[in-house]
Image (tube, grey):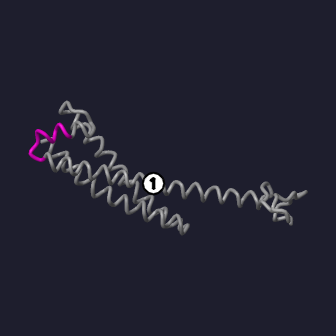
Amino acid sequence: MHDTTLLNLFIDDIGVAEQLLRLIDDEFQALGERDLVRLQSILADKQPLLAQLDQHGKARSQALRDLQLSADRAGLQLLAERSAHGSELLASGDELNALLERCQAGNLRNGRLIRASQASNSSMLGILRGGETPNTYDSRGGAARIGQQRPLSQA
């Protein structure tokens, strides 16, 4: 019974992880285009998928623990050895794991893009407020010494 339950959870979560991966790729594109409306929509679509993956992950772990097995690949392998669905369990578990790793990599990529955008925006605001000055160079290629800086609003 637990093996079919686990297999069904894996199959459901593979579909969910594929949807999440598509949303993460869409999010990357929307971040590049700075499309905030689309980003909000994507975030709203991602939340239930993440909640479902979390809930099913806990259910899979509990099902393995109920069988006195560890809640990892080794426990799944032990279950697969004594299940009629063993090869399917291992294959779907590996597929889900690979998809979740791709989701994580995409999420990290999007995070880097967000941090770069934040740094750029912060730098531009600093220049506009007069707190930061853009680097300028003198005729010898060294950093120019600019005596007094004023915010652009006062220039």
Q: In which quarter of the image is residue 44?
A: bottom left
Q: Residue at x 34, y 60 (%)?
A: 19
Q: How packed is label 1: few (under 14 Cα within 10 Å), some, or many (20 or more)?
A: some
Whether residue 104 sits left or right of residue 16 in the image: it is right
Residue closer to the observer: 39 or 121: 121
Specify the farthest residue to the top: 68
Q: Which amino acid does label 1 sit on?
A: Asn
Whether residue 82 sits left or right of residue 66 in the image: it is left
Residue position for label 1 = 107
**How many numbered dots are placed on residues in this image?**
1
| SS class, disc 1 | helix
How far from the left and from the top, in percent, is residue 128?
A: 76, 62
Residue closer to the observer: 48 or 103: 103
Quadrant containing the C terminus is bottom right
Q: In which quarter of the image is residue 46?
A: bottom left
How far from the left and from the top, in percent, is residue 77?
A: 19, 40
Please give the range of residues in magenta. Answer: 77-85
Quadrant containing the N terminus is top left
Whether residue 138 sits left or right of residue 85 in the image: it is right
The verdict on residue 79 being magenta is yes
How far from the left and from the top, in percent, is residue 126?
A: 74, 57
Whether residue 22 sits left or right of residue 35 in the image: it is left
Q: Residue at x 22, y 54 (%)?
A: 11
Q: Which residue is drawn at 51% across and 66% down?
A: 37
Residue 40 versus residue 100 in the image, above or below: below
Q: Which residue is drawn at 24% across and 48% down?
A: 93
The verdict on residue 42 being magenta is no
Specify the farthest residue to the front: 140
